[in-house]
Image: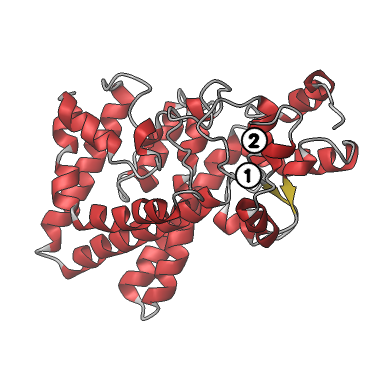
Amino acid sequence: MMMVSFGELDHLRKEFQQKKRIVPYFDLLVTGSVCLGAAVAFLLTSYAWLALVIGSFAAHRASVFTHEINHGMRRDYRFRVIYQLIFGAWFRQPSYLYDGHGPHHHQNSYGTKKDARYSQVYKRLARTLLQGMIFPVLNSALLVVHYSLYLPGYFNIQPFLKWSKVASAFSFNPEGRGKVKSWSLCKIEKFEVLSTALVTLSLIGFSALYFWVFKLLLFTAIVGIGVFALDFVHYCMAHLYTSGWRPVSLEEQVLDSASFDGHFYLHLFLPLGHKYHSLHHLFPEVPYYNLGRLHKRLVQGLPNDHFYLRSVYKSPVHFFKRCWSKDNLLSQSSVGLS
């Protein structure tokens, strides 16, 4: 396999890693507006199921902003406050629950048991389906118990904080949850904890007095389940999951990830640039809104045998055939796992 130096691509990385701060703000506000419109439609019209479907896709897109927060926006407290007020508090997904994403990009921890976003999904399909689909339903059914625990967490009471983080369905590998940092919270995380608890408990409390509040609580619960279901689909299409729990090289990390050509509808299931997930692993510094243009440049300019192009799939069908194939891409890698 012809190897291309990463240094030869460095000028492209520098060109496309330039950030436009207004883009994620505008994107989040538009996404939040769609989600709000779906909630109003659920409350006031007879198109409840359509509102739930639209709300689930919009809320899933909003939830993926936690990924962007962990990639260079952790200290953008204004953005985190807006995210929390628009989405996190209402759907019980504060951004700090995504903590621990760093090992998913480090060569010594990607694809290992330290990686909370990684699981041998195709080798343990039944367990993964059970964990990824049933847990959110049970989680929603236990709203009062679960989110009442956020208030003690606000005061850094360790057992409650640890439980709330471990219960996050942003993580699919239970062996990788909660191993990356201390459980103490900074000020922005305390705000996220407190606002999530107060909004949730208020919805639960007032739902007994006002029917429309009950319907709003029902909307957030059902859409929350839809978000986790879409996140599970998103998660299944991100990687081949063939690391064998061993550290891999950057080339192998890209080969174990997926990007997709065409198929505009995939932006619904893989929002905010996750349609080009292998490219994100190659250049994690590049913001999501530049990945599409960078992908086109690489497809046009790289030799056909470059490892990035081998991680690009023509369709989801092509990708899932590769997932189930014994002849996976890592076995063809120049470094290969044995």
The N terminus - image quarter: top right
The percent coordinates of residue 163 (x first, y second) are 22, 35
Q: Is residue 293 visible?
A: no
Camera-near label (2 vs 1) is: 2
Q: Is residue 133 above or below residue 28?
A: below
Q: Is residue 216 above or below residue 334?
A: below
Horizontally, residue 305 falls left or right of residue 270, namely: right
Q: Which mark is residue 238?
A: none
Dot label at residue 273 = 1
Considering depth in this image, is 134 or 330 the residue closer to the camera?
330
Q: Amino acid at mark 2?
A: His
Q: Is residue 27 left or right of residue 138?
A: right
Q: Residue at x 43, y 30 (%)?
A: 113
Image quadrant for the C terminus? Answer: top right
Secondary element under disc 1, as helix, strand or loop, is loop
| Residue drawn at x 40%, y 39% as measured from the top left | 173
The reply to whether discs 2 and 1 touch (Cβ–Cβ < 8 Å) is yes
Q: State which tag comes first along the sequence, 2 or 1.
A: 1
